Image (spheres, rainbow, N blue to C red):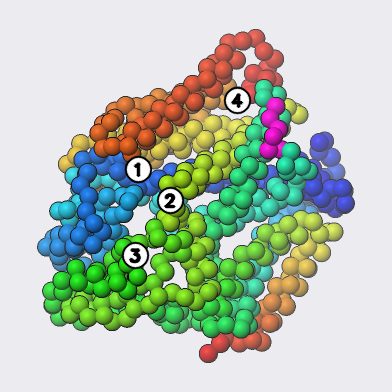
Amino acid sequence: MSALPSAAVREGMRQCMAWLHGWTGLLLGHVLFLMCLTGTLTVFKAEISRWMRPETTASAAPADAMVAATRWLERNTSGSTGWFLTAPDSHQNAVQATYDGTGGYVTRALDPVSGAPVARETLGGEFFYRFHFELELPYPWGRLLASLAGMMMLTALVTGIIAHKRIFKDIFTFRPTKGQRSWLDGHNALGVLALPFHIMITFTGVLTLASLNLPWGMAAGYGADVATLYSDLTPGSVTRPALGEKAPLAPIAPMLAHAQRHFGGAPIGRVYVFNPGDKGAVVVVYPSDQKAIGYMPGEISFDGATGAVLKAWTENRPAVRAYQTVYGLHMARFAPELTRWLYFLGGAMLTMAIATGMVLWIVKRRERAPLSIGNRILERLNVGMLTGAPIGAAAFLIANRLLPLGMADRAQAEVSAALWSAGAVMVAGLALRPAIGWPVLLGALAVACACAALLGPIWAGGPVMVTINLMLLGVALALTPLILRQTKRLSAPVPLRRRMAPA
Amino acid sequence: MTVKRRQEGWRYRGNVALRVLAGSVGAYLVMALTAALLARTLPMSRVEAVTTATMIAYLAAPAVTIWAFLARGPWRALAGVALVAGLLALGAWAAGQPA
């Protein structure tokens, strides 16, 4: 692209915005693609977890499941500094638990009736959720990279809008099989049709990591006094050190019943137990986040040893509520079924908008002149990343079906399967000529999706299992005509310039 | 669009580099200082002011980035961002940390 504003001042403004849109989108485009893909899958995090734990079919009321979980943890951990439990709800049936016993913290799904970790050790949908903002990088680098990518996306969205002449018309414009025009039309339609969603999800996404990526308001208000900031933000939670004196945890059921009354009847959502087994133990209970958009609208703390209420809080402060609402809008845990599908659709469109944008960058330049060496590498990186990431996700599901149940570090092995297969596809994408790489690797993706659907239980486990299997098969089916067209083009005598077009 | 040879020169690259500096580091600086100033001056309780300031400040960054590329010249972009950041910093410093 050309034309910085100094070159062509007034009439160049739109061109300048298009230039900025291109570069802000391109620089971390692959990171954004990864984040959007895993974020979109995270909408159905609970359902994916259920798909990945077909043996765990039991269900229990949230409070009963919490009692079972804490009972098991009491018997099977000692010297813990914390148990962080999320109760089952209408979407997930297991208790999601993070706790430490011997060694570091582990994350396990606990059976809602027995309280013991479920047989098929897996991160489930939690993998996609974590990957979405931590990108498998050590703290805080993954979150910082995600924040940076989010800010660039925000800029890319705004500049993309300014660069447009006719937003409304673009919704209805699609000129297929016209090379660059088709890619541009597709990119525009995907971007514009769900534009409010794209802006909302990007803005709220960056804000969820505010304490890490923009701590300066907090620093200006509180200086180094983090303890006061924390207690001001969550006045109902109590932080105190362990006393070093043993004391069994008081019965938890009455605390949960009391908490539920405090929340006005809303079911309990999370239970955090600090220093269990110590006299200074604290139990903090939060309501379910399915009942309101605002995240964690209150909390109540109990003395772990006596069961007495230490502090209770209902959030009414407008700015804090606003932040919680922004946070909740991103997490979508409030969303009923239909809204979740809309989130999924919006996320899928954003993922596709990023993918088409990355391809468009190449197609546009190729139709003008032979590609530079940098753009030829980018073209191959596109092949590897845009097919490698979804293949990694499918490999994660396949590994879940194939790895033996009792295997040591099974959950981590699933993650490794995902990362290694995505890496292998990246290498293949770099090695193969794009005209061959696209159909071959898209074909591999279709096969992987079909395998994930057909390997395991197909019907058992109810509608969740069937729906996800059908969606996987749907992806495989949708890819088939695309692959066939590309292979046909490979053998047809077309001009070289067109033959290199990826679709 | 034809890429003009003139633009591929160092002048053009320097132009872009300065604007990128203003639009990235500069934009973050303005965003951070906006958060700091508002956190100290908004007429609300301390935690409310901090929360509101943080949410508003995010809007500043894309605006600064876009302006950095639209400004008449690269030095003007840098100077503009520096001026705004300086004023915000001065304001935040003058307001002092709330008790």
- Disc 2, SS: loop
Identity, as a three-letter code, of the amino acid under mark 3: Ala
Q: Do marks 2 and 4 share a subunit? A: yes
Q: CA distance from mark 1 to mark 2?
A: 17 Å
Above or below, A309 against A436 in this view is below
Mark nearest the camera among 1 and 3 is: 3
* Residue A358 visible: no
The residue stretch that appears in magenta:
A170-175
- Disc 1, SS: helix
Q: CA distance from mark 2 to mark 3?
A: 16 Å
Q: CA distance from mark 2 to mark 4?
A: 38 Å
- Residue A212 in the image, given as x and y percentages of width and height: 49, 66
Q: CA distance from mark 1 to mark 3?
A: 25 Å
Q: CA distance from mark 4 to mark 3?
A: 52 Å
Above or below, A208 against A435 in this view is below
Camera-side residue: A195 or A354?
A: A195
Identity, as a three-letter code, of the amino acid under mark 4: Pro
- Disc 3, SS: loop
Pointers 4 and 3 in contact (CB under 8 A)? no
Pointers 2 and 4 in contact (CB under 8 A)? no
Q: Earlier in the sequence, mark 1 or mark 2?
A: 1
Q: Which residue corresponds to mark 2? A: A336
Magenta-colored stretch includes residue A173? yes
Q: Which residue corresponds to mark 1? A: A48
